[in-house]
Image: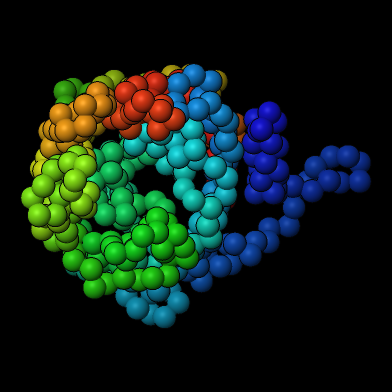
Amino acid sequence: MQNQPSRLLLAAATFSVIFMSAPDVASAGDGKTVDAPTTKSARDILADWGVAFSATYIAETFGNPTGGVRRGTIFTGRLDFGTDVDLEKITGWTGAKFHANMYQINGQGLSRDYVGNLMLVSGVEALPATRLYEMWIEQSLFAGKLLVKVGQQASDVEFFDSKYDDLFTNSALGWPGITGINLLSGGPSPPLAVPGVRVKAQITDNITAYAAIFDGDAAPPDSPLDPQIADATGLLFRVRDPAWMIGQIKYGFNIGPAQLPATITGGAWKHLGEFNDQRFAVGGTLLADPAGTGDPQKLRGNQGIFGVYEQMLTRAAPGSDKGLAFFVRSSVSPSDRNLISLYVDGGFLLTGFSNARPDDRIGVAMTYARISDAARQADRDTFALTGVPVPVRDYEAVLEATYGVQVWSNWLVQPVFQYVFHPGGGVADPDDPTQTHRIKDAAVFGLRSTITY
């Protein structure tokens, strides 16, 4: 794996050459350039018909020179190919559009294979697969004030989200760690989407309400397989599992003479399925009891509340939409049926800081996921019943710093640094024969290349 960075840059450069649009000029016989005849490309013709295709290729290499379960370096790639269709242009169906996209994922995962943390180093990390991700139709009503989306879809783009977190690579800085860890199959977020219905209503110029109901599990809940293996193609289209429901209200406003934009969001979710008790086994015995079954008892239902605040702090120039901005997100869930009971993240994004490189971005963020009281007590039970002084899990936190270099309009390259505190929440190192030492904190270095077309 010593040549992974060079492989990354080679792949990025190759895709850039393929996808960069050629200048609209031609060479004259005397070496001068003249305007080429104006002809529409196939892409422009399709756009006139209401059909658009897109492709995004993310290639990344990460390594942990210190800490984690073991040291190593990985390469991961994900091709996202999608299409959007204006059904009004194609069929005359007023206000309707269709979207579908698929993933081709390859490579290893640093968190899975080396670090052992809960909040994955990369949101791209997943088991190798070629699968359908989203496929939905959205209907616009009342002059666009009401949007209804039906079909297989994800929740992470609109719910519990900030517009300032997209640069970061850690999975929890996309779909928050508490939902990604606690929900069955991680909830509807990459790499698994589920069938659902989402309603978005523009109540006033400043207030937007969202509500959605999704199938509660991307994979069969009784399957012994990893959900990504159980739904390897994204074609299960499960609709009979207990539902997961989420809603939020977003209020936007401006602050001060500079009219700095800010948004505050409040929401809640409810799951109707069954979740494992974090401390007690079937029959009411302790999970840590060597004489017990070791099978957690099932608790009906789960829920959580969350909030998001984001604001631009300064503008790069008067009237500019670039500058320094920050966000903070938080959420709580019940302790008895969730590994994470409290979650907080936040960060800063700086744009427009260089006239020479106006599209470069710098981001610094941190996540904190608290292990629930019930899970902590289960560790204490193990010590009391077995005499083995296993570590009592407490929290996992991640610090990330990254710099996005806009090489070309469709090519972003970003070096990344992450420091993972208490991987796995401070769980015992699986390679420690005594099971008394935690996984060591990990320093992670990486490089991501994102090419869009």
Determine if residue 266 is in view: no
Between 441 and 308, the residue placed more toward the observer is 441
Residue 100 location, x and y as percent? 44, 65
Q: Quadrant of the N terminus?
A: top right
Type of colouring: rainbow
Horizontal relation, residue 97 to residue 330: left or right? right
Q: Quarter-wise, where is residue 59 in the image?
A: top right
Name the residue: 36% across, 60% down.
Answer: 224
Name the residue: 91% across, 41% down.
Answer: 30
Residue 251 location, x and y as percent? 14, 42
Between 15 and 203, the residue placed more toward the observer is 15
Between 102 and 438, the residue placed more toward the observer is 438
Residue 165 location, x and y as percent? 34, 35
Between 59 and 81, the residue placed more toward the observer is 59
Name the residue: 44% across, 26% down.
Answer: 68
Q: Quarter-wise, where is residue 234 in the image?
A: bottom left
Residue 216 versus residue 160 in the image, above or below: below
Name the residue: 31% across, 50% down.
Answer: 186
Determine if residue 384 is in view: yes
Q: Quarter-wise, where is residue 136 in the image?
A: bottom left
